[in-house]
Image (cartoon, rainbow, N blue to C red):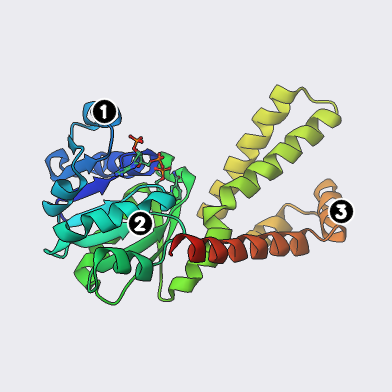
Amino acid sequence: MTTSRIAFIGAGNMAKAIISGLLAEGYPDAQISAAGPRMETLNKVAQEFGIAVSTDNAATAARADVVVLAVKPQMLKEVALALRASLTHKPLIISVAAGITTASIANWLGENQSIVRCMPNTPSQLRAGASGVYANKFVSDAQKSTASAILGAVGIVQWLDDETLLNPVTAVSGSGPAYFFLLMEAMIDAGVELGLTRECAAELTVQTALGAAMLARESEYDVAELRRRVTSPKGTTEQAILSFEQDNLRASVLKAMQACSNRAVELSELLGK
Ligand SMILES: NC(=O)c1ccc[n+]([C@@H]2O[C@H](COP(=O)([O-])OP(=O)(O)OC[C@H]3O[C@@H](n4cnc5c(N)ncnc54)[C@H](OP(=O)(O)O)[C@@H]3O)[C@@H](O)[C@H]2O)c1
């Protein structure tokens, strides 16, 4: 992996997840720094990771080859406008802020900046994330490789050649963990209804979700075939699947994900002003 100097602007959950992933992959701590408004947060980060920290966003960004914008979306405009003057050396900018377009970021930071926009998800905290990533036209192939290496430290990376596809990515992987949590909640409640203790139902449900995801990831078969293989004719699973299909589970999932993607578009327009 490249050893560019990486500056994190914002040292919260997502920044810490990426820093932790980079260090686990052997990235030199001396090449990583982080900036934020409160020394209390920064001291904890410095202690945990052994990296340089500062309350001066601009000075931190000015020294970096890669600047990762890891503040809350509603903070990004203010933070980016204040960084503008310190980015004349044209570092690679990586934004993990949900919903904010590269055009909005370029508006605030200055034109001709190389900007990569990433939509990560919460399992990044366990290095099991899934990110959709888009690069604007100023990002070189070498910078794309750098971004892949940095974001790949917390999970898989899917490059997109159309920025609007980050809205469906939000509907699939960005918000996706919550759908699985909801299904697990419903399965645990149903297990209790059928007579199991809550603890037993929860243990079995979570392990089943993990095992199913691992099978889906590792198997030579796609998920439809995996489902068919556990659904014997006239067997128990078939009864459950038939019930889901009769209740239009697929249509319900599509409707939910369309609503999610539409909301991503609305929020993007709102936050990008
Ligand atoms: N967490 C996830 O799994 C996840 C998933 C998808 C997308 N994202 C995106 O990642 C970004 C960060 O999310 P997060 O979960 O990491 O949030 P977070 O834990 O709240 O972290 C945000 C950080 O920004 C810092 N900050 C606030 N004002 C700042 C300023 N003016 N300059 C520099 N830093 C400032 C905060 O510092 P203090 O703590 O000192 O206030 C905090 O450490 C968001 O844009 C979000 O959309 C996160």
Residue 62: x percent and y percent?
A: 13, 53
In the image, 256: left or right of 110?
A: right
Question: In front here: 210 or 90?
Answer: 90
Residue found at x 59% / y 42%: 211
What's the residue type where badge 1 is placed? Answer: Glu
| Residue wearing tag 3 | 243
**Mark 3 or 2 closer to N-term?**
2
**Mark 3 CB near ligand 1 (8 Å cut):** no
**Alpha carbon separation for disc pair 1 and 3:** 49 Å
Judging from the image, what secondary structure is the residue with disc 1 in?
A: helix
What's the residue type where badge 2 is placed? Answer: Lys
Residue found at x 50% / y 62%: 270
Residue 44: x percent and y percent?
A: 28, 27
Q: Which mark is residue 99?
A: none
Residue 129: x percent and y percent?
A: 44, 49
**Alpha carbon separation for disc pair 1 and 2:** 29 Å
In the picture shown, does residue 206 fall above or below 141?
Answer: above
Residue found at x 57% / y 52%: 175
